[in-house]
Amino acid sequence: MNPRQPLRRAFVAALGAAAMLATVPSLHAQEIKERTLRFAFSLAKDHPLGVGAHKFADAVAQKSGGKIKVNVFPNAVLGSDPQNLSAVRGGTLDFTSMATGIVASLDKRFMVFDFPFLFNDAQEAYAVADGPVGTQLLTDLHQHGLVGLGIWDLGFRNMTNSKRPIARLEDVQGLKIRVIGSPIFIDLFNGLGANPVPMTFGEVYGALESRAIDGQDNPLGVIESAKFAEVQKFLSLTRHVYTGMPVVMSKKTWDGMSEAERRVIREAADEAKIEQRKITQAKEAQSVDTLRKSMQVNEVSAAETARLRQKVQPINDKFAREVGEPLVQQVNAELARLRAAK
């Protein structure tokens, strides 16, 4: 027997295996189908959330080899936040993102993120959103026809109005303020002595312009991108509520996907979340400088912030009972741990 024959056979076998691998598509590629999906939201294309949505779309395209395309629809062109949420649940829209206060219409536990003066900074909010509390809340959205893909960052809310600077608790009283249609926001502004007016985001600019309302509250990036400076004179840096933005996907779309496609979506969403948060943080500092050029901007002193916090504590106590004391205790324990580690 030729001593080289076993080597030759092994070489031929290796060539055959290589040829088979080269001609048969990978299982991953076979599992990814050509799809066009839609991602709609109320904010502007150039807002950090809009930029994040485009980064998500780019990541999906890259990870799927160009097979999955995500078209982005900003500025409420496909509907208001409640309409988009309903469409995603029904499977006629694939992705949307909106404030936790609106998602709380499906699961009131999301209101825990909206407790006034709960978070000292964005890092605390991220830790709770990415930790056991946020993970469980997002997972449980499947009961409502949704798949939670993470909680993005809208930022800390500040008040604008057309009548006066808000430097003291008393300055809020009597102002007609647009609020998210969430019970905790309505109670918050009632508790501060304002007249809260629930309204979808797409209606706010017109209502401010016509003076149907005096003011509104939103993070700085939203105030800038929505051009509220055109119809509002005063910006007060109250930082009274942090707003997270859950990104949700239609469970109907998700259920029709392979494991490989789901992995693409998950990985792209995780990457986009990190980038979107970085953009939001950078944008906040830039936005306040820009807004100072066209609005009268004032800080709120630590003493007045303490008064505001004390004033709204009964609201936090009330909604702690609604969302569940164990959940609130879990959040407070996590915050205490984070603060002790600083």
Image (cartoon, helix red, strand yellow):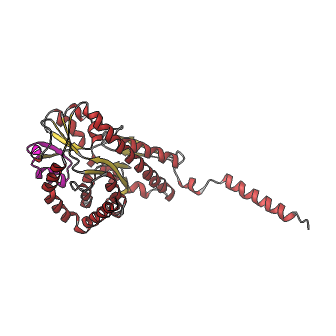
328 within the magenta span: no
Q: Can residue 24 be seen at all in this image of the molecule?
A: yes
Q: State which region is magenta.
A: 170-194
Residue 323 shown left or right of residue 149 in the figure? left
**Res. 317 image quadrant:** bottom left
Q: Nearer the viewer, residue 251 or 232?
A: 232
Residue 113 horizontal/vertical position (percent) = 26, 56
| Identity of the residue drawn at 67% across and 55% down | 21
Residue 174 shown left or right of residue 20 in the figure? left
Q: Quadrant of the N terminus?
A: bottom right
Q: Nearer the viewer, residue 286 or 255?
A: 286
Residue 332 horizontal/vertical position (percent) = 26, 64
| Identity of the residue drawn at 32% across and 56% down | 124
Q: Nearer the viewer, residue 47 or 43?
A: 47
**Res. 110 image quadrant:** bottom left
Residue 80 horizontal/vertical position (percent) = 27, 44
Q: Can residue 247 be seen at all in this image of the molecule?
A: no
Q: Quadrant of the C terminus?
A: bottom left
| Identity of the residue drawn at 12% across and 55% down | 311
Q: Seen from this angle, which residue lies furthest right?
A: 1
